[in-house]
Image (cartoon, rainbow, N blue to C red):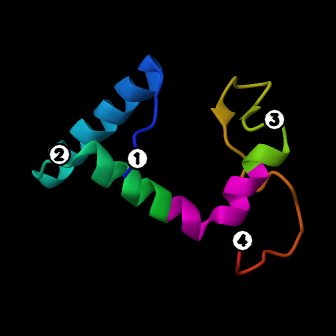
């Protein structure tokens, strides 16, 4: 695997995810393994991942409660291609 540069925030969050996996499973997980699993999961949802990059609004804030969430589907419709 080639190396990729991550900013400090992303590295810190990746390490927190690794710690959470270890707490829940009792097994250590490497950064590479965690990233591989995350990419595998994202690949299975690649249409939704692509949608995140089609719009500038990747998160929605509820004006009443202030809760911020990621919408279920950012761009409605559009057939997914198996080779994407």
Q: Position of residue 72 (x, y in %)?
A: 71, 55
**Residue 58 vertical placement versus 74 (above, below):** above
Which residue bears the numbered disc 3? 57
Q: Which residue is mark 1?
A: 2
Disc 1 versus disc 2: nearer the observer? 1
Question: Comparing marks 3 and 1, which lies closer to the viewer?
Answer: 1
Residue at horizontal 86 percent and vertical 55 percent from the top:
75
Q: Which residues are magenta?
A: 41-51
Q: Secondary structure at mark 2?
A: helix
Please name the residue that numbered disc 2 is placed on: 22
Q: Quadrant of residue 67?
A: top right
Q: Determine the CA span between mark 3 and mark 2.
A: 33 Å
Between discs 2 and 4, the one toward the N terminus: 2
For marks 3 and 1, the one nearer the N-term is: 1
State the image coordinates of residue 68 (x, y, percent, origin top left): 66, 31
Local packing at callout 3 (Cα closer than 10 Å; few below 14, some 14-19, many 20+) is few
Q: Which mark is residue 84?
A: 4
């Amino acid at each position: 695997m080639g190396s990729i540069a991550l900013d400090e925030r992303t590295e810190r969050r990746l390490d927190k995810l690794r710690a959470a996996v270890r707490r829940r499973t009792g097994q250590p997980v490497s950064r590479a393994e965690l990233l591989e699993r995350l990419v595998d999961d994202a690949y299975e949802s690649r249409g939704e991942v692509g949608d995140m990059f089609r719009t500038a609004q990747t998160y929605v804030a509820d004006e009443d409660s202030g809760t911020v969430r990621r919408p279920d589907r950012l761009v409605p419709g559009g057939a997914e291609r198996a080779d994407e």
